[in-house]
Every structure is written in C-alpha cells, then in structure tokens.
Image (spheres, rainbow, N blue to C red):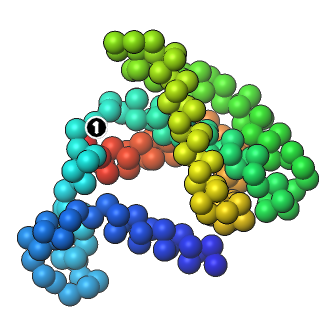
C-alpha cells in the first residue's frame, strides 16, 4: 500500500511540475515509455513561478535541512500511535537526533539567518520562516490525516532519525540538488 502511495505521489509531483499544455504541445510526439518521452520530461523548463530562485548550494542545503528537521518534529509529535510506539517515544528519538546533529542545526540556522539578514533582522526573519514552515507541515498533517501522514513518512523518519552524519549530509545534499533542479538552477 505504501509503495502505491509513493508511486502516486511521484506521478503527482511530475504532473504538478509540468508546464502548461502550450509548452507540452511544442514537444514532439512519441510513444509512452520510450526514451524520447523520458528525454522530453527531462527537458521541460522549470515552472515559471519557480525561476530565478537559485540559492547557492549551501543555502539550499540549509533550507532542505530545516524543512527535514521540521518534518521530523511534526512526525515525532503526531505519529506515536501510528508507529505503534509508546507515548512520547518518537519525540525522544527526535531529541536524540537534535543532540547528535546539533552542529548541523546551528550551522543551518546561522546560514539562513545570514541570508535573511540582507536589509533587515536575520534572526526575526528566520523565526518567521521557521514558523511558517512548521505551520505548512502541520497543515499537511491536517489535510492528509494523521494516519495517512504517518504512513507516508514512516520509512523516511525511521531512516533519518538514526542517520549517521555522513548519511544525513548526503541525503540533504541530494534533496537540495533536486530542489535546485526543480527551480531551474
């Protein structure tokens, strides 16, 4: 069931990233499943609303880590029952994650505060950014329902909550690279 949900989400992500039909009409027709179809998907331009948002790689990684950190927090607070663990067990795992990766948390926050400080207070801007991100994640939880949200995130949570620093860094770099690619960078 989880594999079907993940596959559906992947198809939805490709569909949402696709440009308007006018751009698709400019590509040559080919049979579904052919190399040409894959090449067409790979060569589609980034969605117009995302162009020009090319953060440097280190900032993109800081952003992706903060998104991941927020997701881990929400999952740790909402998914004890769905994961079949005792009350508060996931949150304890999240706290241990914070201890193991404290330097990465601090470095990412400082990178983003510096980036947000142009023309204003970077700390306040970061706090607003982080609050908005947490609200978006909580809204995602609400929209999906806790059981569905927890099912979708269970494997990623289990993998990342105990990840060694090198594995976590590689995951974040990959996520940031994908985000930059989707932004047309």
* Residue at the outermost right position: 86
Residue 138 as seen in the image, left or right of residue 21: right
Residue depicted at x 45% and y 47%? 175
The answer to whether residue 153 of the structure is visible from this angle is no
Judge by depth and name the residue closer to the eye, 169 or 143.
Answer: 143
The residue to which callout 1 is attached is 53
Residue depicted at x 71% and y 54%? 158
Please state the horizontal and vertical placement of residue 58, each as a whole percent of the image.
Answer: 40, 29
Q: Relative to 14, say whether 183 is above or below.
A: above
Q: Quadrant of residue 121?
A: top left
Residue depicted at x 28% and y 37%? 53
Residue 119 as seen in the image, left or right of residue 66: left
Please state the horizontal and vertical placement of residue 122, each as a whole percent of the image.
Answer: 46, 15
Please state the horizontal and vertical placement of residue 94, each as a whole percent of the image.
Answer: 75, 39
Residue depicted at x 13% and y 82%? 29
The answer to whether residue 26 of the structure is visible from this angle is yes
Q: From the image, which quarter does the C terminus lie in?
A: top left
Q: From the image, which quarter does the N terminus lie in?
A: bottom right
Q: Quadrant of residue 103?
A: top right
């Amino acid at each position: 069931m989880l594999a079907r949900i993940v596959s559906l989400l992947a198809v939805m992500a490709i569909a949402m990233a696709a440009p308007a039909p006018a751009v698709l009409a400019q590509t040559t027709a080919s049979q579904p499943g052919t190399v040409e179809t894959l090449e067409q998907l790979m060569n589609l331009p980034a969605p117009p609303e995302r162009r020009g948002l090319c953060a440097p790689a280190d900032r993109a990684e800081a952003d992706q880590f903060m998104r991941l950190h927020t997701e881990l927090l929400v999952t740790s607070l909402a998914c004890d029952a769905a994961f079949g663990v005792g009350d508060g067990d996931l949150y304890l795992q999240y706290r241990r994650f914070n201890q193991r990766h404290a330097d990465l948390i601090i470095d990412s926050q400082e990178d983003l505060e510096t980036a947000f400080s142009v023309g204003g207070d970077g700390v306040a801007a970061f706090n607003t950014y982080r609050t908005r991100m947490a609200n978006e994640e909580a809204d995602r939880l609400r929209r999906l329902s806790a059981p569905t949200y927890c099912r979708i995130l269970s494997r990623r949570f289990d993998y990342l909550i105990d990840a060694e620093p090198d594995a976590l860094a590689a995951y974040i770099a990959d996520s940031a690279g994908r985000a930059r690619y989707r932004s047309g960078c």
